[in-house]
Structures are given as C-alpha cells and as structure tokens.
C-alpha cells in the first residue's frame, strides 16, 4: 500500500507540472498521511539535515571548476589538441568529439555543462565540414553522458551521500567503465562514419602537434592532480573540488589570461544556479528516503524480488532495466535520490558489491539523459544545434545501442568494474 501511495503521489504531482523537488516533499507528506501522523517539524528537520552534509560541498566547487575551465580557455585548448591528433582522419571530427568529451569529463563531472560546451564548440565544425547533422548531434549527446561516470563526478557524490558509499571508491571504480563508454562510441562512430562524405580536415605539420600538447598541458594536469591526490589520501573528494576550482581560476587568470571579471561573474552565477537545483533535490529526497524507511518500502521490495536474491546477475539485470525505464521519465539527480534508498537494501541482501552497484546505477541513469521524453542532454544539444528531437533520435540510436551493449556486458561480467577498481584503490 505504501508503495502505491508513494508512486501515485510522486508521479501524479510531476504529471501536473509540480517541480520534482516539491513533488518529492509532497510524496513524503502523503506517506505521513498514510501513517496518520503529519508532522511539519519532521519535514523541516529532514530537509535541513539533507543539505547539511560535508561531502555535498564538493558539488558547487566542481561545478565552479567546470564553468571556469570553459570561460578560461581550458576546454578550447583540449579541442585544439584533439584536432591536431585525429582531426585529419576519415570521420576525424567525430573522434575529436569523443576524445574531447573524455578529457572534459575528467575535469568537471557535469553532463549538461560538458555537453553544452562540446556542442557549442564542435557542432558548427561538424556542420561546416559536411557531416550528417542528425548523427553529429547524437554523437555529441552520447559523449556528454560520459561525464557522470568518469571522476570527478557530481553523480557519484550525490549517490555516495545518499547511499553512504565511499565517494573515493566510486571515483576510482568509474575510471575504466567511463573509458569503455568512450571506446564503445569509437567503435559505433567508426561503423556509421563509413557513410559520411564530409570534407577531411587538413593535417597539421608535425611541429604543430607538440605545440598543441603544450597549450593544453595545463588543462591535462588537472585530472592527474585530482586522481593522484585522492588515491594517496592527500585530500578528500570535497577538498578535491576546492583544488579543482582554485586550479582552474589560477590557469584562467594567470596562465591563459582569458578569464575576465565579467566571465568570472557569469561562471560563478551559472554554477550557483546549478548548485541550487541539485542541492534542493538532494535535500528533498532525504525527506522522502526517511519516510520510505519508516513505512518499510525497501523491505516490501526485497520481499517482492526475494526469488532473485540468490541469482545476482539476473537481479542486477532487472535492476538495470528498472533504472533505464525510470531514467526515461525522471531526470538524473531525482533518479538517484529516489531509487537508491529503495534498491540498496536489496543489493546488499543479494551480496552485490555496493560500489559496483553505484557505478552501474550512474551509467544506466546517464543513458536516460539521451532518451525521451525527458532526455535533458539530448534536448540541450538539440537546442544548440537547432535540430528537432525526432531528428536527433534518429542520429543517437547507434550510440545508444553501443552504450546499452556495454552495460549488458558489465552486468554479465562484474569483474570488469570490480577488478580495476581494486587496482586503483
């Protein structure tokens, strides 16, 4: 009964246009009404406690770092370096998109911010070179969803706080799956780009390639600093966000000297807006998670799926399928904050590694960002490239299939995530 009340109130309020943060709080109130004890004080306390978390302080700093990198010229130099390496090959600009996306994912961890930057810089180049714009739009969108998987990841921070899982462990476990996502896109693009008749980019002289690496060197050092610092315990994930923001500020102001006061103000403003949205979602979800625990909603789910607890692979496949379906109708952050508290007890009961579960959850939820009807990342690219959603869907499906095949392989072979994570840790 509590499950029906929760889903009915949540989906009902969302369907009439209530913002998801408030829909989460209203669903918590509905569960209180079911128990016959509506207490506004509990609602307020849990809302404040949900945002009062030291690890969550990493989110605004990583978002600031990402905005400063875009405004300070770091992102543009990464594109220049990628162009120098593979821009002259057949389908080369597509490989530039993937390579740039992988590097930028290791800098900010925000799918929307990374995708918007990729689209603004590379969609005009792809269009002018004669690439199929629908396919190009799909590739940029599919590349943008790598950002939540490769550390530093805002998604991992939210999941780690929500599920009380080691954020450093999630960061380290996300490295190999994130790279595999990039490789799956390389294979898919190599196959579909055979149909392209685009103009090849001129090959840079050999003496220009070291110069391109030198100009991008400051940007490439940031993920190295973060991963080494986390691996050897030099700083926590929250402190890593501060390091990233300070580093991006220093490079933009002192080294590249492209970060003007106006750009700095706009970067801080954009990061503040994104932080406010995410933090309100997380705080509201903590209220809902508390009420779901009180009404024993996770216990009801465990009872429902108990026949599959002794078959972890089958159970994980069902969980991934559920996350994918939910991700089609819910945005990324709400999917984490609503589903994780429900699924985690089931995962632990089945003996599935929580860090492995966290990586699979983020990967699958990220794919939902390029599927309708929500598809926030796909919508972002459509707006920038001025392509309809229907056309973008035609272009994105080869890359969507490639990502789903990879997720299925990781379900069948969990060691592909667990073993490399143990190496890094």
Image (cartoon, helix red, strand yellow):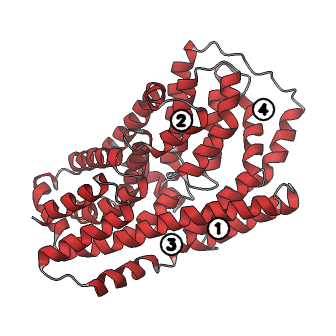
Give the SS element for disc 1: helix
Image label count: 4
Residue 328 percent across, percent down from the top left: 34, 44
Residue 416 percent across, percent down from the top left: 42, 46
In the image, 21 versus 403, the foreground residue is 21
Residue 56: give its label.
3
Comes first in the chain, label 4 or label 2: 4
Query: Which residue is label 1 attached to?
Result: 229
The answer to whether residue 120 is left or right of residue 10 is right
Instruction: Kindly indicate the quadrant of the structure image that contains residue 406.
Output: top left
Q: Residue at x 24, y 66 (%)?
A: 345
Query: Looking at the image, is 120 positioned above or below residue 47?
Result: above
Q: Work out which quarter of the rendered image holds the N terminus and state it.
A: bottom left
Q: Tell me the crowding category of disc 2: few under 14, some 14 to 19, or many 20 or more residues within 10 angstroms, Cα based.
A: many
Query: Looking at the image, is 166 positioned above or below residue 334?
Result: below
Q: Residue furthest right?
A: 207
Residue 260 percent across, percent down from the top left: 83, 59
Task: Tell me how far mark 3 sits from mark 1, CA to CA.
Answer: 19 Å
Comes first in the chain, label 3 or label 1: 3
Mark yes or no: residue 418 visible: no
Query: Which residue is label 2 attached to?
Result: 382
Task: Tell me how far mark 3 sits from mark 2, CA to CA.
Answer: 31 Å
Q: Tell me the crowding category of disc 4: few under 14, some 14 to 19, or many 20 or more residues within 10 angstroms, Cα based.
A: many
Comes first in the chain, label 3 or label 2: 3
Task: Tell me how far mark 3 sits from mark 4, CA to CA.
Answer: 38 Å
Instruction: Kindly indicate the quadrant of the structure image that contains residue 352.
Output: bottom left
Query: Which residue is label 4 attached to?
Result: 84
Comes first in the chain, label 2 or label 1: 1
In the image, 266 versus 229, the foreground residue is 266
Foreground tag (3 vs 1): 3
């Amino acid at each position: 009964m509590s499950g029906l009340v929760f889903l009915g109130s949540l989906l009902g309020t969302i369907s009439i246009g209530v913002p998801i943060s408030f829909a989460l709080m209203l669903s918590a109130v509905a569960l209180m009404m079911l128990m016959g004890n509506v207490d506004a004080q509990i609602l307020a306390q849990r809302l404040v406690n949900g945002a009062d978390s030291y690890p969550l302080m990493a989110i605004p700093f990583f978002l600031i770092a990402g905005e400063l990198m875009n405004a300070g010229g770091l992102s543009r130099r990464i594109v220049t370096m990628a162009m120098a390496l593979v821009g002259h090959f057949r389908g080369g600009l597509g490989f530039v998109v993937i390579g740039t996306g992988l590097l930028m994912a290791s800098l900010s961890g925000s799918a929307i911010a990374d995708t918007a930057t990729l689209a603004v810089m590379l969609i005009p180049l792809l269009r002018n070179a004669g690439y199929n714009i629908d396919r190009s739009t799909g590739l940029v969108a599919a590349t943008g969803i790598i950002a939540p998987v490769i550390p530093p990841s805002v998604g991992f921070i939210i999941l780690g706080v929500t599920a009380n899982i080691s954020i450093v462990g999630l960061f380290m476990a996300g490295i190999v799956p994130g790279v595999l996502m990039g490789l799956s896109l390389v294979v898919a693009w190599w196959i579909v780009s055979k149909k392209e008749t685009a103009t090849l980019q001129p090959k840079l002289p050999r003496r220009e390639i070291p110069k391109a690496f030198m100009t991008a060197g400051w940007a490439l050092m940031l993920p190295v600093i973060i991963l080494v610092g986390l691996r050897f315990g030099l700083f926590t994930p929250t402190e890593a966000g501060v390091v990233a923001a300070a580093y991006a500020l220093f490079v933009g102001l002192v080294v590249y000297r492209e970060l003007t006061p106006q750009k700095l103000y706009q970067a801080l403003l954009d990061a503040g807006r994104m932080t406010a949205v995410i933090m309100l979602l997380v705080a509201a979800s903590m209220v809902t998670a508390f009420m779901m625990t009180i009404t024993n909603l996770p216990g009801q789910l465990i009872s429902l799926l108990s026949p599959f607890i002794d078959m972890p692979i089958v159970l994980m496949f069902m969980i991934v399928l559920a996350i994918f379906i939910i991700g089609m109708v819910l945005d990324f952050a709400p999917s984490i904050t609503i589903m994780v508290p429900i699924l985690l007890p089931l995962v632990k009961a089945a003996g599935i590694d929580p860090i492995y579960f966290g990586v699979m959850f983020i990967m699958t939820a990220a794919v939902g960002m390029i599927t309708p009807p929500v598809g926030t990342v796909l919508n972002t690219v459509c707006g920038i490239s001025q392509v309809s959603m229907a056309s973008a869907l035609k272009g994105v499906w080869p890359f969507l299939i490639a990502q789903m095949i990879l997720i299925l392989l990781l379900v069948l072979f969990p060691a592909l995530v667990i073993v490399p994570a143990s190496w890094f840790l």
